Image (cartoon, rainbow, N blue to C red):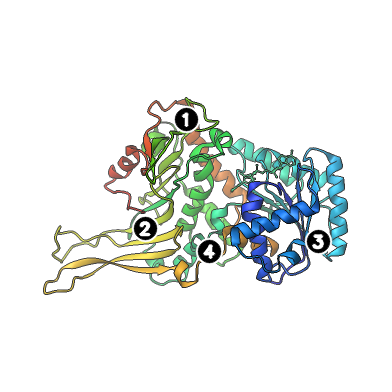
């Protein structure tokens, strides 16, 4: 699709997300010619910066993250700053004046993207003001890009949604789930639907279980105030983990359009077996990190981190078993686990195929390793297929072999950052890789039933995993009960 002209308004332009992700991504798009020349960016935040201060900040952000700055002066000449108080109508009126002026100056045809890179409690207020103060009353397109978290539970998500829907239609709302911008997450569909090899096997006859791990080495860092009210279930499972489940489990869409893909994902969420009440402890495990060692250095327990309640009941780890009750997946567990302060930083999906009916080959332990398809999401990007082959030598002995495809080494290390891809999609009006309200609502509905049980029952054994490990014992037992184990992701 051709490059549209657009005004991009970033709320929270002095913040961390803008600096680390949005400015460098816009710069990449600019350099690739994906932004064109008919664009302008207005940064807003509380601080009384000048245009120059924002420009300097953008330059600094680009240099720090990319190390190069060709055409940087041309690029930043498109940036403007306006101090802004999100609750104050006067502020929006000033913003509108600047927006209208830039619209003329850069021939933007009234196209506007509003990117809310701010604390979520302001999302609703800003959306309402955009409408009442006339900023989204424009002859071009208007799009609202909204960061996570989208609500705290189903109720609050509904309230927020009602607020933003007063100002924008569902088609105009781009709910960011940055996992959906990752190259290998987008590759899940291609692997499945562009290969004759996998789709015929992609069901309960041939797949024994699927494992999704998203582990971090970092602890809560400076985010404790938010994290204490959230925890891993809300922060990671409701959005990123369930989105990956949906992409793995969905039926082939009849075409690759936004509506078709999203509706297939919604059907997966509808088929997710609800886990509630007493079942929660059978299907879900929560953990909280204790002290431990990371890279030979001592790190504190979660409860001793800055701004964390010393008796905190917040989970920093979740493992779960999800069942999708439909024809394709009946009986196939989807295991997920995610946490902080784990042994390794890695997001990986392991698809374990069922054993063949009978082993004809001798090998040391008389067992054949199952076939695995591993999708490496980050930090490495690629696919590994684990097969069995003949060991060289006289005997008919087998040995496991791996077929590897590494995205990173084939295409260089510059696969676009998730935010770059998502901003590009938004500019071109493609909402496929953003979460539809129906997906958000169904996933909160699933997660709420688990949080409810956890919140009513204090976990007495916290902390229950040492920093630098792959989580509590109970996470391993969750699979052992079913005769499986977590495949190593290191
Ligand atoms: P931040 O605290 O660094 O920045 C917040 C911004 O909001 C600042 O520019 C601040 O000036 C502005 N602001 C705060 N109160 C204001 C007010 N009353 N009026 C006007 N401006 C105000 O936050 P962040 O880390 O950039 O996160 C922003 C959003 O992005 C959050 O929803 C967060 O969950 C999400 N997010 C951030 C990251 C990340 O890597 N930082 C990753 C994923 C999602």
Between the residue at mark 2 and the residue at mark 1, the CA separation in whole angstroms equals: 37 Å
Q: How far apart are marks 1 and 4 (CA)?
A: 48 Å
Q: Position of residue 234 (x, y in %)?
A: 53, 40
The vertical placement of 247 against 90, above or below, is below
Q: What residue did someone put label 4 on?
A: 253
Give the distance between the C-alpha atoms of the residues marked 3 and 2, in whole angstroms. Answer: 45 Å
In the drawing, what numbered circle is on residue 480? Answer: none
Q: Residue at x 35, y 50 (%)?
A: 331
Q: Alpha-carbon neighbours of circle 3 within 10 Å: few (<14), some, or many (≥20)?
A: some
Of mark 3 and mark 4, the one earlier in the sequence is: 3
Foreground tag (2 vs 1): 1
Task: Identify the residue position indicated by label 1 in the image.
Answer: 304
Compare marks 2 and 1 and give the one earlier in the sequence: 1
> From the Cβ of disc 1, is ligand 1 less than 8 Å away?
no
The answer, for residue 20, to whether it is visible in the render is yes
Residue 240: where, in percent of width, then height? 52, 50
**Closer to viewer: mark 1 or mark 3:** 1
Look at the numbered disc 2 and give the secondary structure of its residue. Answer: strand
Point out the frontmost of discs 4 and 2.
2
Of residues 366 and 158, which is closer to you in this image? 366
Q: Quadrant of the C terminus?
A: bottom left
Q: Residue at x 74, y 64 (%)?
A: 73
Report the residue marked by disc 3: 140
Q: How many labels were placed on the picture?
A: 4
Dots 1 and 3: beta carbons under 8 Å? no
Q: Name the residue under label 2.
A: 351
């Amino acid at each position: 699709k051709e490059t549209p002209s657009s005004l991009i308004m970033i709320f929270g332009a002095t913040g961390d997300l803008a600096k680390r992700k949005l400015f460098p991504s816009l710069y990449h798009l600019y350099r690739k010619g994906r932004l064109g020349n008919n664009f302008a960016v207005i940064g807003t935040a509380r601080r009384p910066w000048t245009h120059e201060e924002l420009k300097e900040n953008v330059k600094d952000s680009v240099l720090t993250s990319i190390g190069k700055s060709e055409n940087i002066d041309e690029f930043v000449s498109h940036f403007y700053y306006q101090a802004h108080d999100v609750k104050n109508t006067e502020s929006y009126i000033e913003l509108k004046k600047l927006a209208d002026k830039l619209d003329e100056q850069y021939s933007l045809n009234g196209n506007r993207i509003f990117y809310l890179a701010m604390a979520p409690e302001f999302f609703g207020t800003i959306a309402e003001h955009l409408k009442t103060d006339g900023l989204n009353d424009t002859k071009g397109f208007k799009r609202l890009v909204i960061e996570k978290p989208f609500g705290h539970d189903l109720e609050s998500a509904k309230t927020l949604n009602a607020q933003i829907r007063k100002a924008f239609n569902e088609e105009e709302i781009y709910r960011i789930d940055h996992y959906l911008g990752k190259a290998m997450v987008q590759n899940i569909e291609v692997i499945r639907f562009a290969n004759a090899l996998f789709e015929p096997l992609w069901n309960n006859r041939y797949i024994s279980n699927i494992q999704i791990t998203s582990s971090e080495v970092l602890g809560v860092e400076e985010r404790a105030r938010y994290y204490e009210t959230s925890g891993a279930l809300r922060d990671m499972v409701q959005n990123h983990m369930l989105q990956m489940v949906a992409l793995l489990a969905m039926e082939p869409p009849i075409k690759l359009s936004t509506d078709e893909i999203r509706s297939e994902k919604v059907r997966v969420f509808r088929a997710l077996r609800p886990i509630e009440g007493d079942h929660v402890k059978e299907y879900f495990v929560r953990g909280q990190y204790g002290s431990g060692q990371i890279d030979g250095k001592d790190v504190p327990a979660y409860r001793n981190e800055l701004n964390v309640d010393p008796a905190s009941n917040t989970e920093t780890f979740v493992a779960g078993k999800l069942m999708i009750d439909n024809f394709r997946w009946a009986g196939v567990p989807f295991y997920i686990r995610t946490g902080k302060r784990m042994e390794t930083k890695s997001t990986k999906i392991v698809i374990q195929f069922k054993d063949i009916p009978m082993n004809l080959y001798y090998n040391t332990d008389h067992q054949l390793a199952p076939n695995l398809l591993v999708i490496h999401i980050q930090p490495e990007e690629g696919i590994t297929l684990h097969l069995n082959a003949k060991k060289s030598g006289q005997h008919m002995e087998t040995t496991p072999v791996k077929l590897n495809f590494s995205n990173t080494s084939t295409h260089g290390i510059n696969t676009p950052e998730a935010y770059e891809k998502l901003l590009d999609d938004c500019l071109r009006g493609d909402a496929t890789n953003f979460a539809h309200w129906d997906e958000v609502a169904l996933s909160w509905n699933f997660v709420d039933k688990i949080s409810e049980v956890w919140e009513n029952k204090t976990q007495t054994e916290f902390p229950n995993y040492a920093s630098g490990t792959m989580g509590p014992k109970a996470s391993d037992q969750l699979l052992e009960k079913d005769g499986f184990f977590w495949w190593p992701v290191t």
